[in-house]
Image: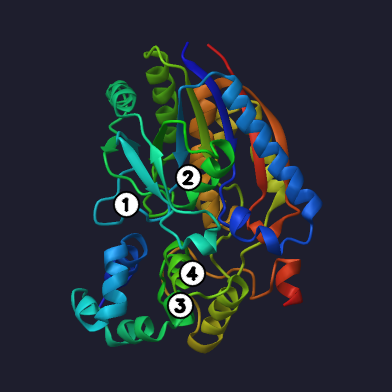
Amino acid sequence: MSLVYAGVLSHAPGITGRADLVKNTEKRDEFYAALDKQRQEIEDSGAEALIVIAAEHFANFFMNNMPAYCIGIGNRYEGPIEDPAWLKIDKTDVPGSPDLATRLTKEVMKTVDTAYAEEWKFDHGIMIPLNFLTPRYDMPIIPVNINCQGPPLTPLNRAWEFGAALRRACDSVPEKVALVGTGGISHWPATPDSGKINEPWDREFLDSLMNQDKEALLRYTDEETYNEAGQGGFEIRTYIAAAAAAKGKGELQFYTGELPIFAVGCTVAKFSISG
Amino acid sequence: MSLYHLQKFLYELNRDDSVKEKYHSDLDALLSQFDLSAEENNALREGDIGLLYVLGVNGQILMHFAALLGIEWFDYLEMMREGINKYGSVRAGVYAMTGGGESYTAEGKEQ
């Protein structure tokens, strides 16, 4: 088994960009500590590369040719596309892992028709996780995208199958691979409603996610999600894919709805890797 | 004359430094490459965040454009609210305002 770590975390741009505006600094710092613990767990796993299943925000893909799934097989990446002063993350180069990523892609393609890309610009959706999980930008990254922005979106059962395919791919290579899914749960980002969080909805979803309750996870419809969890809720696809890859139950290490200035219920969790 | 081209312009601008240079050096030539209505053209030229929001520009694309213009976070949220007040409800897309215009952050209410 070469998948050595699987987890999920939030990626909202305010997590770094609006850090200095936060009033509840105690809760903010608890969140940062949980992210640092996740970094340590990934390092301790011995992972040689990190797959980031992200929900990008028009940094690479547009409605002229929108893939439901894409895997980065490039040698290097750059980010953030956003104004560094706004995101408070400097522009940097990030190493890729072309040989490993290509082998993983070939294996995924046996069951899921994923796109692939040798060019990829990282937006906050990947840069926020890397800022905390690989702060020296020295771990090879394999970016993966699930379209959560430009409807029509891939059905949740397909996101599950994509995660399962990633797991089979990881298990087919000798390298130790870590994987995180990054997205929001309920949130209304980049709208006047930014900061609105449906905590009961979040907790119900997270409970199903931690318990690997596939039936409950795949029962959500986009219409229900939009009404109760906002358009940001479409990003549950990344969490669902991570759960499908891990197979084992999860441990919710941090969740709070008390940092609305970050515009999302801030989440950190890990899964056990089960056969 | 379509939301598609309006968003395509902002997508290219947000992600490509060479497009950002053209945006500052020759905006007319840059805009002529996109099939935009007069209303869309004016909204882009004037940085009318409220109108762009109402026209249905995806919030993630609009947020990055607002950052490019140097607009502070809570000003950006307020510009979208003002756009709703001035031009009416969001006309397309999935980024409509659903909360009645209230602020959901303590930090924002203080400003």
Which of labels 3 and 4 is toward the front? 4
The subunit carrying tag 2 is A
**Element type where label 2 sits in the image:** helix
The residue under label 4 is B67
Which of labels 3 and 1 is toward the front? 1
First in residue order: circle 2 vs circle 1: 1
First in residue order: circle 3 vs circle 4: 3
Which of labels 4 and 1 is toward the front? 4
The subunit carrying tag 1 is A
The subunit carrying tag 3 is B
**Cβ–Cβ below 8 Å for labels 3 and 1?**
no
Residues at marks 2 and 3, CA–CA distance in whole angstroms: 28 Å
What kind of residue is marked 2?
Ile
The residue under label 3 is B54
**Cβ–Cβ below 8 Å for labels 3 and 4?**
no
The residue under label 2 is A126
Q: Residue at x 29, y 49 (%)?
A: A66
The residue under label 1 is A61
Q: Is residue A178 above or below residue B98?
A: above
Residues at marks 3 and 4, CA–CA distance in whole angstroms: 18 Å
What kind of residue is marked 4?
Ala
What kind of residue is marked 3?
Val
**Which residue is at the front of the view, A159 or A222?**
A159
Residues at marks 2 and 1, CA–CA distance in whole angstroms: 14 Å
**Which residue is at the front of the view, A217 or A202?**
A202
Residues at marks 3 and 1, CA–CA distance in whole angstroms: 23 Å
**Dot 3 crowding, Cα within 10 Å, few <14, some 14–19, many 20+:** many
**Which residue is at the front of the view, A17 or B104?**
A17
Residues at marks 4 and 1, CA–CA distance in whole angstroms: 20 Å
Q: Is residue A53 above or below residue A188?
A: above
Q: Residue at x 67, y 57 (%)?
A: A19
